[in-house]
Image: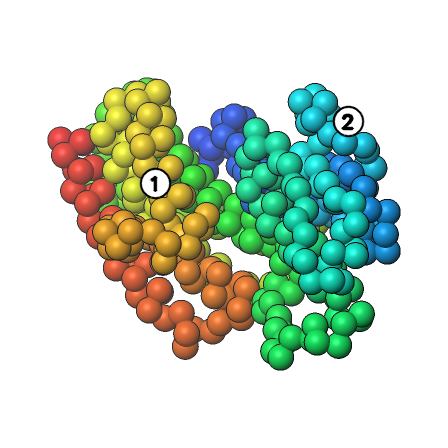
Amino acid sequence: MRLRNIWHLGVKELRGLWRDPAMLLLIVYAFSLSIYTESKAMPESLSNAAIAIVDEDRSMLSGRIVSAFTPPYFGAPRMITTSQMDRRMDEGLDTFALDIPPDFERDVLAGRNPAIQLNVDATRMTQAFTGSGYVQQIVTAEVAEFVAGHREDATPPVGLALRARYNPALEASWFGAVNSVIDAITMLSIILTGAALIREKEHGTVEHLLVMPVSAAEIMLSKIWSMGLVVLLASGFAITVVVQMALQVPIAGSVPLFVAAAALMLFATTSMGIFLATLAGTMPQFALLLMLVLLPLQVLSGGMTPRESMPEMIQAIMSLAPNTHFVILSQGVLFRGAGLDVVWPQFLALLATGGAMFWLALRQFRRFLG
């Protein structure tokens, strides 16, 4: 195996990519606009939810509850009547309708535990699921604070001091931006290397390579380093320019350490892309294989849902995937400021999974050339 052959073949791949405007547009979009939009539109975050309030009490306590619903979680509350509540929800104008009953403040101070009715438009599933909890917390907090100022026996014996570490404001965009970068690295590395090999098959240049004095390992390594370099440079741009500058997401750890981990991740995912391309005969078949592979990698790797909430069998299976270790490493480095002394097990796991992926891809690639 000669490094000169690997270098020249890799340069050939970069020139082929430069002449493919669709792939270039996909790279630019995946590492810029896609990251920005995904971080600003996290599905589990509540933003400017429409709420209407029926205040039948007109007391100081009900006024405190009304004024507690403020942006960015809720829009300005609309004061309506009981007769308007059902009609507005049927028309889709309000997601939440809060009905404060008459004599609410008097019953609270008397210790009668009155009930407040909350109507939720459950067709807006995401906001309905998270927003009802927000409404309950806001109302409970306002009532407890009001009662504590009017009743001496209402002071609780224990107070909860809440400190949110690493993300004090609980900004969903912080998590969404980093997770989007991880997804883009996985997706683009598999697509670029697989498309490069399929492009060779469709253009008939694979036969040209077979008559040249190059080995299968040299051909495969050339595609890995060239496409991996493109994705690595794009991910570095995304972390520094899009995430830190445009989205104002603070990075607690070392960006070079993250880039080093991304290089190991790319070694595994580019090998996976070549493996899938040898199984697919055409680009549409390769796209179908991508749907079967990318979705589990992104959903079950811990980027969207914590691994602890998954079944143990799924956790064991996904421990063989490089994404799982890369997500753990990235969150530790970028969010918590972890160093190499903390994330070295994930580095070793990425190296092991990358070596296994490369061996499987090289074996399949030799069969493909044969």
| Residue at position x 66%, y 57% in the image | 113
Where residue 193 sits: x, y (%)? 37, 37
Q: Which residue is mark 1?
A: 296
Point out residue 179 in the picture as x, y percentages from the top left corner: 51, 49
- Mark 2–mark 1 Cα distance, whole angstroms, equals 46 Å
Mark 1: secondary structure: helix
Residue 198 sits above or below residue 120 on the image? above
What residue lies at 43% left-to-right and 50% top-to-bottom?
Answer: 305
Q: Residues within 10 Å of mark 1 (few under 14, many from 20)?
A: few
Q: Nearer the viewer, residue 190 or 210?
A: 190
Which residue is at a point 61% across and 63% down the rendered structure image?
A: 167
Q: Is residue 49 something that shows in the picture? A: no
Mark 2 sits on what residue? Answer: 84
| Residue sticking out furthest to the bottom | 157
Residue 27 showing in the rendered view? yes
Name the one closer to the observer, 214 or 160. Answer: 160
Image location (x, y in percent) of residue 153 = 70, 76
Quarter of the image where the C terminus is located? top left
Mark 2 residue element: helix
How far from the left and from the top, in percent, is residue 230?
A: 48, 44
Amino acid residing under circle 2? Gln
